[in-house]
Image (cartoon, rainbow, N blue to C red):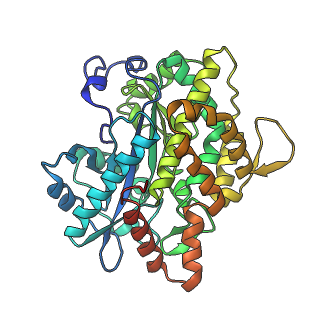
Amino acid sequence: MKQIYPPSITGNGFAAGGSVLDHKFGQGEPYTLGVEEEYMLLDGETFDLVQHIDTVLAAVAGHELEDRINAELMQSVLEIATPICRNAADVDAELRRLRRYVTCVAQEKGLRVGSAGTHPFSLFERQRITARDRYRNLVDQLQYVARRELIFGMHVHVAVDDAEKAIQVVNGLLADLAALLALSGSSPFWRGEPTGLSSSRQMVFAAFPRSGPPPRFRDYADYAEVVGQLEKTGCIADYTHIWWDVRLHPKWGTVEIRICDAVTRVEDAVALAAYCQALVKHYCERYERGEQIPSYHRILTTENKWLAARYGLEAPVMDLATGRRNRVPVAQLVRRTLREIEPHARELGSDRELEGVRDILSRGNGSDRQLRIFNANRDIVEVVREIADATEVAAEPATA
């Protein structure tokens, strides 16, 4: 991943290959944000994926945003990363600036840019692996599992000021994974066919080792021991080869929420960032008050995640917090969570952007929109064209 935080936060003090106990929690301002998005590089006429990441990177060389734009596993994927943001309004400005710039660069080369969890019809067999040792090694290790990973995600980093607190925040967030996936689901197609899933991306990525919801850890030492064993035995090069839905990022001092599909509308991305930021603050303050943060068995959180991947915002999930025997719509849990975290969003200056979550609930997620477009004419290319149009329109400055 391209580094989000500048050297002043991630520089000296975290030795490469050193103990995972080394960390940067508490060395930056708490609750600051960083967002990464993965975009599709599209042919301007056919809307198929194209292998032109090197063309784009050459075009951005020397620009002030060069360090915010990077390659990914496949040459048809472009990743952007925001700088540190204090609140969701900052995220909005930075994402619009980055989307606007990469859209202009792509159009100058006859390309388009799109943001969604999967490309509706392109085939992974036709994609080329990026010519970097990290990605070649990954394919060498994972083989077909890596070659099939033609998916696009959105990751949200939220800074936490204490390692023990961060562990408990991750434990608490396990119950929120289904809601985040339902809100962000934008991958109903795979290889040109509707899958019946709101997030096909999750089903593809589930084949990766060390993915899915993380185990619950007692404390930071427990986490460090487990990850350290994987590193010392050579199973992984470092903890970034653990691809859980939510994980610690000790080098940056953040909790990284990785469950979300890449979303088409920039407003949705900003709303999800605000939701994540307020959730982290909510769990941090519960920890600071000495309250026990509830956490649930991985079987239960994984089941809810599956239901969200399958049904999106209509998912009938288990209400783990109350232990009710009947299932409830995931949208009902999102509304309850919003009531709990809205005061935190106001304190963070992200309350206006958090309202975007209610907008998603009212109009549906990205998968709902893609399916409406497809069902009108059964034209899969039209779906991708609409994704590109909405991604690029979303790059325009926000209206007052």
Please state the horizontal and vertical placement of residue 196, each as a whole percent of the image.
63, 68
**Above or below — where is 400 with respect to 346?**
below
Where, by quadrant of the figure, is residue 212 drawn? top right
* 293 or 139, nearer to the observer: 293
Residue 29: where, in percent of width, then height?
41, 23
Q: Percent x, y for residue 106?
A: 25, 65
Q: In this view, does 106 lie above or below 231?
A: below
Which of the two residues, 262 or 197, is positioned nearer the viewer here?
A: 262
- Residue displayed at 59% across by 50% down: 357
Q: Can residue 271 be seen in this view?
A: yes
Q: The N terminus is located in which quarter? A: top left
Q: Quadrant of residue 155?
A: top left
Residue 247 lies left or right of residue 38; in this view the side is: right
In percent of width and height, residue 359 lies at 60, 56
Residue 235 visible here: no
Q: At 59% from the left edge and 31% from the top edge, which residue is drawn?
A: 344
Question: As rendered, which of 92 and 110 lies closer to the eye?
Answer: 92
Above or below, 372 against 317 in this view is below
Question: Which residue occupies 61% across, 43% down?
Answer: 177
